[in-house]
Amino acid sequence: MKEVEKVLVLEASYEPELLLERMREILEEFPLDLAGKKVLVKPNLLGPWPGESGIITHPMTVKAMVEALKERGGLVQVGDNPGLRGYGCVGRVCRETGMEEAVGPYWTNMASSPRSVALGSRFVKEVSISSQVLDCEVLVSMPKFKTHVSTLITGAVKNSFGFLVGADKARMHAAAPRFRDFGELLVDIYQVRVPDLVVMDAVTAMEGNGPSCEDIRHLGRILASRNGVALDVVTASMMGMDPLLIPSIAVAAERGLGPASLEDIEVAGPFEVIPDFKRPSTVPRMSWTAPFHRLVFALLSHRALGVDRGRCTGCRTCEEGCPMGAIRVERYPRFDASKCINCYCCYELCPEHAVKLNRLLRLVQGRV
Ligand code: SF4
Ligand code: SF4
């Protein structure tokens, strides 16, 4: 008989006592052997944005999870490798997100001691993984409920991309530039260390062209599961997307890592497809329109990016984050379309939200 994975959907806010209660409930529902064990909590800390931005896993959710794990005897550490590159960026992100204040002594710098790991992947043979990921006995992944302009959702599987230290992430984009291939590579990395528990911050949700845009809405939920793929299927379904259109879900399901559809999941709690949810411009609404949508996208993608000069500060974060060397910042960034692979790292990392998608691409958002 086929195993049915369970996903718990709980009502929540960022109120500390309620969050702690929710985390206790989750650990009751999905018990872990924690006493005396090395536990790593891995939130999504894309960059130096505060919890209210909706871009990162809110520090209060992480704090509540740390407390709940400690109550059960876990030896807890918290860490992530942000998308930024450069000396000191991990510490900066910890401070500016508010994570330092929330979990202070439990924070670990994941960039300090990476180890080389062989990867069973078509795209790269070896990756640089934080030793904390490799050495922990229990891994709790804490993604954020967000859309993503290239991977469509930023869920549990995508959260494992943060196992890699900054510079290695750029190498992955260059190695697998096509969306489907990149989804497969994400699953390769997810399989390095499959989380024991996944708890998603969906109190605020990001719609539209995530993962770092300003389209935030209140959802008031925490999602949890032992199976990250099941949690991603529920996330995509709540966003109104066919889960199998998400490359990482399709590949993970093919590999037997989790279910491909809601039918194989027991969803406990207040689940609903979010009304009028804005999908990323890059997602076709239905599989039969996908070729048309891809054609529209391919025709426009060579001019996909622009800059809002009113917002740009010339900080060069986009230039440093581009895996293809396709950006040169003088006063403002200039994009070399012949080198660009449409990975959207520049769009994702710009601290001022100054990198913009082509207006036509935005017009087709969720409507094709
Ligand atoms: S577009 Fe954004 S990341 Fe690039 S230089 Fe301007 S402000 Fe910095
Ligand atoms: S210009 Fe932007 S989208 Fe193009 S390769 Fe560089 S980071 Fe990726």
Image: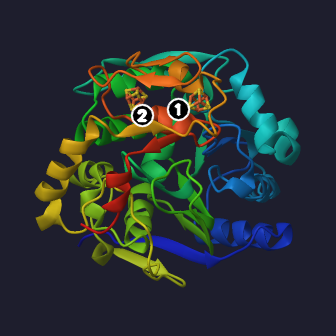
Q: Can the viewer see residue 355?
A: yes
Question: Do the CB atoms of the residues marked 1 and 2 lie less than 8 Å apart?
Answer: yes
Horizontal side of residue 69 vs 159, given as left or right = right
Task: Tell me if mark 1 has few (under 14), some (14-19) or many (20+) residues whose alpha carbon lies within 10 angstroms of its own.
Answer: many
Task: Tell me if mark 2 has few (under 14), some (14-19) or many (20+) residues whose alpha carbon lies within 10 angstroms of its own.
Answer: some
Q: Who's the residue at 54% across and 85% down the image?
A: 270
Position in image of residue 230 (x %, y %): 39, 63
Position in image of residue 166 (x %, y %): 55, 23
Q: Who's the residue at 45% across and 73% down the image?
A: 277
Task: Name the quarter showing ligand 2.
Answer: top left
Q: Earlier in the sequence, mark 1 or mark 2?
A: 1
Q: Which residue is mark 1?
A: 163
Q: Can the viewer see residue 165?
A: no
Q: Which residue is mark 2?
A: 192
Q: Who's the residue at 78% across and 51% down the image?
A: 73
Query: Spatial distance from mark 1 to mark 2, Cα to Cα?
Result: 9 Å
Residue 28 occupies quadrant: bottom right
As helix, strand or loop, the secondary structure at mark 1 comes to helix
Residue 239 occupies quadrant: bottom left
Looking at the rendered structure, which numbered label has been put on residue 142?
A: none
Horizontal side of residue 332 vs 175, given as left or right = right
Looking at the image, is mark 1 or mark 2 nearer the viewer? 1
Q: Who's the residue at 41% across and 45% down the image?
A: 357
Closer-to-camera residue (181/312): 312
Position in image of residue 340 (x %, y %): 32, 26
Name the amino acid, label 1: Phe
**Image height of 288 relative to 331, above or below:** below
